[in-house]
Image (cartoon, grey):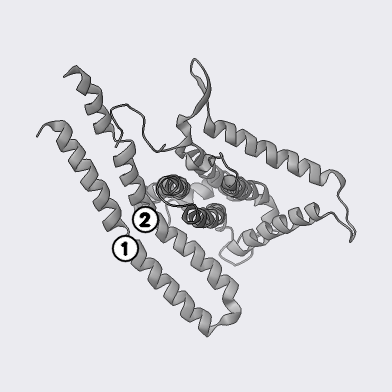
Amino acid sequence: MQAARGKPAVRLSSDEVIFWQSGVFKLNATIVYTWGLMLTLTVGSMLVTRRLSLGLHRSRWQNLLEIVTTGIESQIADVGLRRPRKYLGFLGTLFLFVATANLFTIIPGYDPPTGSLSTTAALALSVFVAVPLYGIADQGLLRYLKTYAEPTIIMLPFNIISELSRTLALAVRLFGNMMSGSMILAILLTVTPFIFPIVMSALGLLTGMVQAYIFSMLAAVYIAAATSDRESPSGASDEA
Amino acid sequence: MDSATLIAIASIVTAGLTIALGSIGPALGEGRAVATALSSLAQQPDAATTITRTLFVGLAMIESIAIYCFVVSMILIFANPFWTHVIAEAPGK
């Protein structure tokens, strides 16, 4: 419990570590680490893609990026989206951001920004906004709104509630997994010799990768559900 | 027993009970999921990638229930609004 001195022994989230503050604007650890991640991803990709080669001789970094990109694309196609390139930007960014955020926990002194409810809520909100956008872009406004009333109009409030609750579930799932991983590590470091926290850290890495995959795949499934009512009753599909 | 003690007792006991009871269900569910996945892997080894991927997705969904319970118990221990309210009032007493 929080002692009378007012500071908890174990931090609940990296939101509370403030690097710089002026008035209302606070620069906390979450934001700084997020910026660091953005910088790493962007500059890294720029450096790798400066000289792309189409032939058989390519740099190993280009190979790595190609493996990752084609892997994500095939996973998106597996979920049921017929043109994975359209969604590759959004879903691939989700996966890469969450995966690198969780992967860099190997670096000492780093706190994953996904261990803070603000980051995961922001990611879940972006999925919440993206799903109707893709659905409307695919089907048109009226047909998309009509899917909320399927199979009957009685289901309308339940469909809306399910939209909201799965957004909340996305945020809390990622937050809970990341926060619990770092918290268990912090607590273990105070009580046990070094070998046990290393094992827990490896487990934390594994769950981090799985959670990144889960997050992007769930977003893909929601988008597929919002866009898949495209086939007309005669069975002809409008997809080119 | 004043209210501060009562709040402390209630929070601690509830936090322990939440995570204890809340992890029973997901653990059983995950055990059944893995058992079924293993038997279907034995029956159809060439569908191994699909089965494994679906297994991991299903496990993550089941796990999130336990995560919700864990989050509640963490809030009760570390970010308890009732406790902070009581502590804030304590110096005045």
Q: Give, as a three-letter code, the residue at label 2.
A: Ile
Quadrant hosting residue B23: bottom left
Q: Does residue B75 lie above or below A205 as drawn?
A: above
Which residue is located at x 50 percent, y 62 percent? Answer: B57
Provide the secondary structure element on which disc 2 rests.
Answer: helix
Q: Is residue A81 toward the left or the right of residue B92 in the image? A: right
Q: Chain of mark 1?
A: B
**Residue at mark 2:** B65
Labels 1 and 2 touching (C-beta < 8 A): yes
Q: Earlier in the sequence, mark 1 or mark 2?
A: 1
Location of the C terminus of chain A (image quadrant): bottom right
Which residue is located at x 43 percent, y 76 percent? Answer: B36
Say if residue A136 shows up in the picture: no
Q: Chain of mark 2?
A: B
Report the disc number at residue B25. Answer: 1
Tell me the crowding category of disc 1: few under 14, some 14 to 19, or many 20 or more residues within 10 angstroms, Cα based: some
Q: Give how far apart the Cα atoms at labels 1 and 2 are.
A: 9 Å
Across and down, in percent, residue A86 comes to: 68, 51
Location of the N terminus of chain A (image quadrant): top left
Across and down, in percent, residue B43 comes to: 52, 84
Which residue is located at x 15 percent, y 37 percent? Answer: B6
Residue in front for this viewpoint, A198 or A124: A198
Say if residue A117 shows up in the picture: yes
Provide the secondary structure element on which disc 1 rests.
Answer: helix
